[in-house]
Image (cartoon, rainbow, N blue to C red):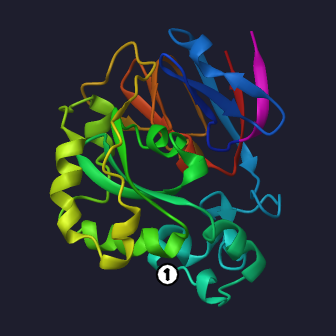
Amino acid sequence: MLRFEGVLQKMPTHLRDQVHYYMNLGVDLIHMNEFLDKEIHLQFLKYECLNCNKDKKIFRQGFCYDCFYAIPQAGDWIMKPELSKAHLDEEDRDLEYEKKVQLQPHIVYLANSSNVKVGVTRKTQVPTRWIDQGAHEALEILEVPNRYLAGIAEVALKEHVADKTNWRTMLKNEIEDVNLEVTRDQLKQYLPQEVLPYFLDANTETNIKFPVLAYPKKLKSLNLEKKQHFTGKLVGIKGQYLIFEDYTVFNVRSNEGLYVSLEV
């Protein structure tokens, strides 16, 4: 039996013929694809905030309450790019950090995981962001020089296309292929004038395959804090979810900051 222990963090990924997933427990990087069709035991041991490393109940995004409302990594502009102000030299929580993150190339994209949605990510996060959302196809439609411009483009487009993923539909693989290039061209008319010079009219779709042996017909979401431990056969990984044979699914990203043991 193999046993690992550490604090859960978002699984790093690598796209080859299919997505390769690695469980990040701080010290160990565990290639999870190798454990498909094997029984896995997960146990919640304690909390460990990803910022202060203290055993304090996790509030959001892997951070305790105090850290979430203090650190720049959890500023409102993270979830709402249109609130970015570093390009105006205005500070939210830490201007140096905000300039580093906000003042770099960002991509506005279309992705299809449960339905076609619009999203924003740093250019360095392509295709990682699409993988994390469980998208089987995605397309870059804008490359802009800062996060603010990406944000105002997203705000304009989400009046005409979704900006959220239906995680249940994504995990059941109840999807249909859409021609994202046609959708891109249809949406161009709704973009703000200031982002039109950055429109990408010649890009083609990226297609993504996930390591899934069987998709669940119904879903049971695992709350490891309440249940404390779980054992099941791993039959797939999609987005940031582990999929088990009994239709239990576990969202690794939404459980960041939990200190766990993992046995195979």
Tell me the quarter of the picture where residue 181 sits.
Answer: top left
Tell me the quarter of the picture where residue 22 sits.
Answer: top right
Residue 82 sits above or below residue 134 on the image? below
Residue range of the region highlighted in magenta in the rendering: 1-7
The residue identified by callout 1 is 83
Instruction: State whether the magenta stretch is mostly helix, strand or loop.
Output: strand
The residue at 71%/23% (across/down) is: 30
Residue 21 sits above or below residue 121 on the image? above
Q: Is residue 129 left or right of residue 228?
A: left
Q: Is residue 200 left or right of residue 226?
A: left
Residue 97 sits above or below residue 221 on the image? below
Task: Say what amino acid the circle numbered 1 marks.
Answer: Leu
Q: Label 1's element?
A: helix
The residue at 59%/13% (across/down) is: 35
User: Closer to the camera, 57 or 13?
Assistant: 13
Circle 1 residues within 10 Å: few <14, some 14–19, many ≥20: some
Q: How many marks?
A: 1
Work out which quarter of the rendered image holds the N terminus and state it: top right
Q: Is residue 126 left or right of residue 166?
A: right
Work out which quarter of the rendered image holds the C terminus and state it: top right
Where is residue 81 drawn, in percent x and y?
A: 48, 72
User: Closer to the camera, 170 or 128?
Assistant: 128
The residue at 31%/60% (across/down) is: 163
Q: Is residue 5 magenta?
A: yes
Q: Is residue 34 magenta?
A: no
Q: Answer whether residue 219 is visible to the viewer in this image.
A: no
Q: Answer whether residue 95 is visible to the viewer in this image.
A: yes
Where is residue 133 drawn, in percent x and y?
A: 42, 43
Where is residue 228 drawn, in percent x and y?
A: 61, 39
Where is residue 18 drawn, in percent x and y?
A: 48, 19
The residue at 61%/11% (across/down) is: 34
